Amino acid sequence: MPYWKLNVRLEQHDMAKKLQETLRTGWYFGVLEEGEIGAGDEVILCERSFPDWPLSRSMGDLGIL
């Protein structure tokens, strides 16, 4: 879920809220090993806690929708 750093980075105090309201939240990844990644590198999904949940349900359960 977007958070306050987007507001700071984009210099808009309500950017995180706008992204949440439109469900255009993007993807967040956990880092398992420090290193570098670049264009064309493979990214592997290791785990998905609730694979049958659409994004809208996840956001609704958080009280955002």
Image (tube, rainbow, N blue to C red):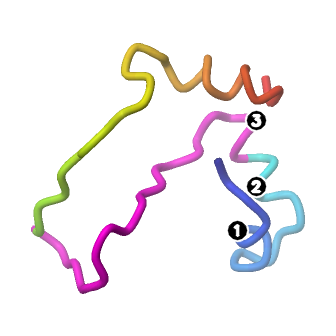
Label 2 or label 3, whichever comes before in sequence order: 2
Residue 50 is situated, as x and y percent measured from the top left of the image, at 44, 23
Give how far apart the Cα atoms at labels 1 and 3 are: 14 Å
Q: Can you say whether 44 is above or below 55 in the image?
A: below
Which residue sits at x=83%, y=69%?
12
* The stretch drawn in magenta includes residue 35: yes
Residue labelled with disc 3:
21
Residues rendered magenta in the picture? 19-40
Give how far apart the Cα atoms at labels 1 and 2 are: 6 Å
Residue 24 is situated, as x and y percent measured from the top left of the image, at 58, 41
Residue labelled with disc 2:
16
Residue labelled with disc 1:
6
What is the secondary structure assignment of the residue under circle 1?
helix
Q: Can you say whether 45 is above or below 48 in the image?
A: below
| Quarter of image, res 14 | bottom right
Q: Main secondary structure of the magenta part?
A: loop
Label 1 or label 2, whichever comes before in sequence order: 1
Residue 5 is situated, as x and y percent measured from the top left of the image, at 73, 72
Task: Pick whichever, 12 or 56, lies toward us.
Answer: 56
Amino acid carrying mark 1 in the image: Leu
Q: Is residue 44 left or right of 29 when viewed as pictured? A: left
Other-residue count near label 2 (Cα within 10 Å), few / some / many at <14 / 14–19 / ≥20? many
> Do residues under tags 1 and 2 come within 8 Å of each other at their CB atoms?
yes
Which residue sits at x=49%, y=19%?
54
Other-residue count near label 3 (Cα within 10 Å), few / some / many at <14 / 14–19 / ≥20? few
